[in-house]
Protein backbone atom coordinates (compact mmCIF):
# COMPACT_ATOMS: atom_id res chain seq x y z
CA UNK A 1 0.00 0.00 0.00
CA UNK A 2 1.41 3.38 -0.97
CA UNK A 3 1.12 6.16 1.58
CA UNK A 4 2.06 9.76 1.98
CA UNK A 5 4.60 10.44 4.72
CA UNK A 6 4.48 13.39 7.07
CA UNK A 7 7.48 14.75 9.01
CA UNK A 8 7.60 17.25 11.80
CA UNK A 9 9.73 19.69 9.78
CA UNK A 10 12.46 21.98 11.04
CA UNK A 11 12.19 25.42 9.37
CA UNK A 12 15.00 26.15 6.96
CA UNK A 13 15.45 29.92 6.48
CA UNK A 14 12.00 31.20 5.49
CA UNK A 15 10.63 27.87 4.30
CA UNK A 16 9.48 24.65 5.90
CA UNK A 17 11.34 21.61 4.56
CA UNK A 18 10.21 18.02 4.50
CA UNK A 19 12.48 15.70 2.50
CA UNK A 20 11.95 12.10 1.46
CA UNK A 21 13.31 9.47 3.79
CA UNK A 22 16.95 8.66 3.15
CA UNK A 23 18.42 5.29 2.32
CA UNK A 24 19.65 3.45 5.41
CA UNK A 25 23.40 3.68 5.97
CA UNK A 26 25.03 0.41 7.06
CA UNK A 27 27.15 1.89 9.86
CA UNK A 28 24.41 4.07 11.33
CA UNK A 29 22.17 2.75 14.15
CA UNK A 30 19.16 0.55 13.40
CA UNK A 31 16.44 -1.01 15.52
CA UNK A 32 12.72 -1.56 15.95
CA UNK A 33 9.72 0.46 17.12
CA UNK A 34 6.76 -1.09 18.94
CA UNK A 35 3.61 0.41 20.41
CA UNK A 36 3.40 0.40 24.21
CA UNK A 37 -0.36 -0.23 24.06
CA UNK A 38 -1.24 -1.33 20.53
CA UNK A 39 -4.98 -1.71 21.23
CA UNK A 40 -7.56 -0.52 23.73
CA UNK A 41 -10.95 1.02 24.44
CA UNK A 42 -11.37 4.80 24.86
CA UNK A 43 -14.10 7.30 25.60
CA UNK A 44 -15.31 9.63 22.81
CA UNK A 45 -13.65 12.69 24.38
CA UNK A 46 -10.39 10.98 25.36
CA UNK A 47 -7.07 12.26 23.99
CA UNK A 48 -4.98 9.28 22.89
CA UNK A 49 -1.21 9.35 23.51
CA UNK A 50 0.80 7.27 21.02
CA UNK A 51 3.62 5.81 23.08
CA UNK A 52 6.31 3.77 21.38
CA UNK A 53 9.44 1.90 22.45
CA UNK A 54 12.64 2.19 20.42
CA UNK A 55 14.94 -0.83 20.77
CA UNK A 56 18.33 -0.84 19.06
CA UNK A 57 19.46 -4.10 17.50
CA UNK A 58 22.16 -6.01 19.38
CA UNK A 59 24.47 -5.70 16.37
CA UNK A 60 23.65 -2.03 15.77
CA UNK A 61 26.06 0.81 16.31
CA UNK A 62 25.24 2.94 19.35
CA UNK A 63 22.85 5.87 18.96
CA UNK A 64 25.11 8.27 20.81
CA UNK A 65 25.80 11.80 19.59
CA UNK A 66 25.97 15.45 20.52
CA UNK A 67 25.92 18.66 18.48
CA UNK A 68 27.87 21.91 18.16
CA UNK A 69 30.41 20.44 17.66
CA UNK A 70 29.12 17.17 16.21
CA UNK A 71 30.41 14.00 17.86
CA UNK A 72 29.46 10.32 17.74
CA UNK A 73 29.65 9.57 14.00
CA UNK A 74 32.23 8.32 11.54
CA UNK A 75 32.79 11.15 9.03
CA UNK A 76 32.31 8.62 6.22
CA UNK A 77 28.68 8.11 7.32
CA UNK A 78 27.73 11.79 7.24
CA UNK A 79 25.83 13.41 4.35
CA UNK A 80 27.90 15.22 1.75
CA UNK A 81 25.09 17.54 0.62
CA UNK A 82 22.23 19.32 2.32
CA UNK A 83 19.18 21.35 1.34
CA UNK A 84 19.39 25.14 1.18
CA UNK A 85 16.46 27.52 0.79
CA UNK A 86 17.51 30.18 -1.72
CA UNK A 87 15.58 33.36 -0.85
CA UNK A 88 16.38 34.89 -4.24
CA UNK A 89 14.70 32.12 -6.23
CA UNK A 90 12.32 30.72 -3.60
CA UNK A 91 13.65 27.24 -4.43
CA UNK A 92 15.30 24.54 -2.34
CA UNK A 93 18.75 23.59 -3.64
CA UNK A 94 21.17 20.78 -2.80
CA UNK A 95 24.60 22.16 -1.86
CA UNK A 96 27.82 20.54 -0.60
CA UNK A 97 28.52 20.71 3.12
CA UNK A 98 31.62 22.58 4.17
CA UNK A 99 30.96 21.33 7.70
CA UNK A 100 28.29 19.20 9.37
CA UNK A 101 27.81 20.79 12.78
CA UNK A 102 24.91 18.92 14.38
CA UNK A 103 22.45 16.05 14.38
CA UNK A 104 18.93 15.65 15.71
CA UNK A 105 16.19 13.05 15.96
CA UNK A 106 12.85 13.48 14.21
CA UNK A 107 9.71 11.43 13.67
CA UNK A 108 7.34 10.75 10.80
CA UNK A 109 4.17 8.80 10.10
CA UNK A 110 2.43 7.31 7.07
CA UNK A 111 -0.94 8.90 6.34
CA UNK A 112 -3.05 5.74 6.36
CA UNK A 113 -5.85 4.27 8.46
CA UNK A 114 -9.04 5.78 9.82
CA UNK A 115 -7.89 8.07 12.65
CA UNK A 116 -7.08 10.74 10.06
CA UNK A 117 -8.18 11.56 6.54
CA UNK A 118 -4.85 11.18 4.75
CA UNK A 119 -2.52 13.64 6.47
CA UNK A 120 -5.41 15.86 7.56
CA UNK A 121 -7.97 15.58 10.35
CA UNK A 122 -10.93 13.24 9.97
CA UNK A 123 -14.43 13.97 11.26
CA UNK A 124 -13.42 12.34 14.55
CA UNK A 125 -9.69 12.97 15.16
CA UNK A 126 -6.78 15.26 14.39
CA UNK A 127 -3.13 14.38 14.92
CA UNK A 128 -0.59 16.44 16.85
CA UNK A 129 3.17 15.84 17.02
CA UNK A 130 4.93 16.04 20.37
CA UNK A 131 8.26 17.85 20.62
CA UNK A 132 11.00 17.49 23.22
CA UNK A 133 9.98 20.79 24.87
CA UNK A 134 6.38 19.64 25.42
CA UNK A 135 5.87 19.36 29.21
CA UNK A 136 4.49 16.25 30.85
CA UNK A 137 5.62 13.56 28.40
CA UNK A 138 8.97 12.54 26.94
CA UNK A 139 9.58 13.11 23.23
CA UNK A 140 12.56 12.74 20.90
CA UNK A 141 11.69 15.30 18.22
CA UNK A 142 14.56 17.73 17.57
CA UNK A 143 16.76 16.37 20.36
CA UNK A 144 20.32 17.60 19.55
CA UNK A 145 21.98 14.90 21.65
CA UNK A 146 21.07 11.36 22.65
CA UNK A 147 22.54 8.18 24.12
CA UNK A 148 21.31 4.61 23.63
CA UNK A 149 23.50 1.51 23.61
CA UNK A 150 23.07 -1.48 21.25
CA UNK A 151 20.27 -3.69 22.60
CA UNK A 152 18.96 -0.84 24.74
CA UNK A 153 15.40 0.51 24.75
CA UNK A 154 13.74 3.85 25.42
CA UNK A 155 10.09 4.91 25.51
CA UNK A 156 8.75 8.16 24.13
CA UNK A 157 5.51 9.85 23.09
CA UNK A 158 5.34 10.19 19.33
CA UNK A 159 2.12 12.22 19.19
CA UNK A 160 -1.56 12.36 20.05
CA UNK A 161 -4.91 11.77 18.43
CA UNK A 162 -7.18 14.58 19.62
CA UNK A 163 -10.95 14.02 19.35
CA UNK A 164 -13.05 16.55 17.47
CA UNK A 165 -15.37 18.91 19.31
CA UNK A 166 -18.25 16.88 20.66
CA UNK A 167 -16.17 13.70 20.75
CA UNK A 168 -15.23 10.97 18.30
CA UNK A 169 -17.94 8.87 16.71
CA UNK A 170 -18.28 5.35 18.18
CA UNK A 171 -16.42 2.66 16.25
CA UNK A 172 -13.01 1.14 15.59
CA UNK A 173 -10.07 3.28 14.46
CA UNK A 174 -6.66 2.16 13.20
CA UNK A 175 -3.37 3.68 12.16
CA UNK A 176 -0.21 1.97 11.02
CA UNK A 177 3.24 3.37 10.71
CA UNK A 178 5.55 5.72 12.57
CA UNK A 179 9.31 6.01 12.25
CA UNK A 180 12.34 7.68 13.77
CA UNK A 181 14.97 9.38 11.63
CA UNK A 182 18.48 10.72 12.07
CA UNK A 183 18.97 14.18 10.58
CA UNK A 184 21.95 16.49 10.09
CA UNK A 185 22.53 20.21 9.88
CA UNK A 186 25.58 22.26 8.86
CA UNK A 187 26.87 25.01 6.60
CA UNK A 188 28.15 25.42 3.06
CA UNK A 189 31.32 27.25 2.03
CA UNK A 190 29.49 30.61 2.29
CA UNK A 191 28.16 29.92 5.78
CA UNK A 192 24.60 29.21 4.66
CA UNK A 193 22.60 26.70 6.72
CA UNK A 194 22.09 23.31 5.08
CA UNK A 195 19.73 20.58 6.31
CA UNK A 196 19.56 16.84 5.68
CA UNK A 197 16.17 15.85 7.09
CA UNK A 198 15.20 12.18 6.97
CA UNK A 199 18.78 11.19 6.07
CA UNK A 200 18.64 7.84 7.86
CA UNK A 201 15.66 5.85 9.16
CA UNK A 202 16.60 4.24 12.47
CA UNK A 203 13.38 2.24 12.98
CA UNK A 204 9.73 1.97 11.96
CA UNK A 205 6.61 0.42 13.44
CA UNK A 206 4.38 -1.64 11.15
CA UNK A 207 6.46 -0.78 8.04
CA UNK A 208 4.36 -3.07 5.82
CA UNK A 209 1.22 -0.95 6.55
CA UNK A 210 -0.52 -4.14 7.65
CA UNK A 211 -3.72 -4.06 9.72
CA UNK A 212 -2.37 -6.96 11.81
CA UNK A 213 0.30 -4.70 13.32
CA UNK A 214 -1.74 -1.47 13.40
CA UNK A 215 -2.34 0.82 16.37
CA UNK A 216 -6.07 0.47 17.15
CA UNK A 217 -8.63 1.96 19.49
CA UNK A 218 -12.34 1.25 19.96
CA UNK A 219 -14.47 4.26 20.88
CA UNK A 220 -17.40 3.22 23.06
CA UNK A 221 -20.24 5.20 24.59
CA UNK A 222 -21.82 4.25 27.92
CA UNK A 223 -24.84 1.95 27.77
CA UNK A 224 -28.18 3.60 28.71
CA UNK A 225 -28.13 1.73 32.01
CA UNK A 226 -24.68 3.16 32.73
CA UNK A 227 -25.94 6.69 32.09
CA UNK A 228 -28.78 5.99 34.53
CA UNK A 229 -26.38 4.82 37.23
CA UNK A 230 -24.18 7.87 36.65
CA UNK A 231 -27.19 10.20 36.97
CA UNK A 232 -28.31 8.42 40.16
CA UNK A 233 -24.83 8.77 41.59
CA UNK A 234 -24.76 12.50 40.84
CA UNK A 235 -28.17 12.97 42.47
CA UNK A 236 -27.02 11.06 45.56
CA UNK A 237 -23.88 13.19 45.82
CA UNK A 238 -25.98 16.37 45.50
CA UNK A 239 -28.38 15.26 48.25
CA UNK A 240 -25.47 14.36 50.53
CA UNK A 241 -23.88 17.77 49.94
CA UNK A 242 -27.14 19.55 50.76
CA UNK A 243 -27.51 17.61 54.01
CA UNK A 244 -23.99 18.60 55.05
CA UNK A 245 -24.82 22.26 54.45
Image (cartoon, rainbow, N blue to C red):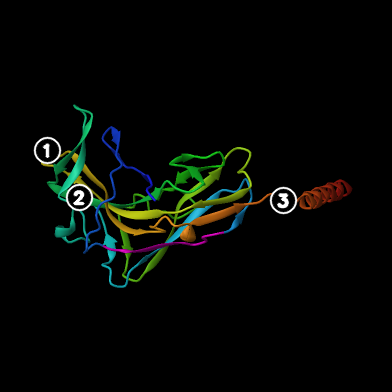
Q: CB atoms at circles 2 and 1 under 8 Å apart? A: no
Name the residue that disc number 3 marks: 222
Of the numbered discs 3 and 2, the one sitting upstream in the chain is: 2
Image coordinates for residue 196, horizontal then vertical, percent: 23, 47
Residue 45 badge: none
Q: Is residue 100 visible?
A: yes
Which x, y percent locates residue 92?
A: 22, 35
Separation (CA) of disc 3 from disc 2? 54 Å
User: What SS does tag 3 mark?
Assistant: loop
Per the image, the residue denoted by label 2 is 101
Residue 186, relative to residue 16: is it above or below?
Answer: below
- Residue at 60 percent across and 48 percent down: it is 46
Dot 3: within a 10 Å radius of its alpha carbon, few (fewer than 14), some, or many (20 or more) residues?
few
The CA distance from mark 1 to mark 3 is: 63 Å
Percent x, y of residue 142: 34, 49
In magenta stretch: residue 81: no
Compare marks 2 and 1 and give the one earlier in the sequence. Answer: 2
Q: Is residue 32 magenta?
A: yes
Give the residue displayed 46% in from the left and 44% down from the top.
Answer: 128
What label does residue 190 carry, if any?
1
Marks 2 and 3: in contact by CB < 8 Å?
Answer: no
Q: Residue furthest front?
A: 1
| Cα distance between the residues tagged 2 and 1 | 14 Å
Question: Which region of the structure is painted magenta?
Answer: 29-39
Tag 2 secondary structure: strand
Instruction: Name the image quarter holding residue 53.
Output: bottom left
Q: Residues within 10 Å of mark 2 (few under 14, many from 20)?
A: some
Q: Position of residue 154 (x, y in %)?
A: 40, 64
Q: Residue at x 35, y 55 (%)?
A: 180
SS of the residue under disc 1: loop
Amino acid sequence: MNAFVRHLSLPLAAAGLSLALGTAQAALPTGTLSYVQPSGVVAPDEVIDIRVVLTLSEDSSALTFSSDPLTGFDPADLPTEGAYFNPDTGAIEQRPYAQVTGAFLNTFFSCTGTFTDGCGPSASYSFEFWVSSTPGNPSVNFLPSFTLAPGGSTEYVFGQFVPAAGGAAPGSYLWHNTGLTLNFIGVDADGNTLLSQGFHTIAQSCPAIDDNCAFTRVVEVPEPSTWGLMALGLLTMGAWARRRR
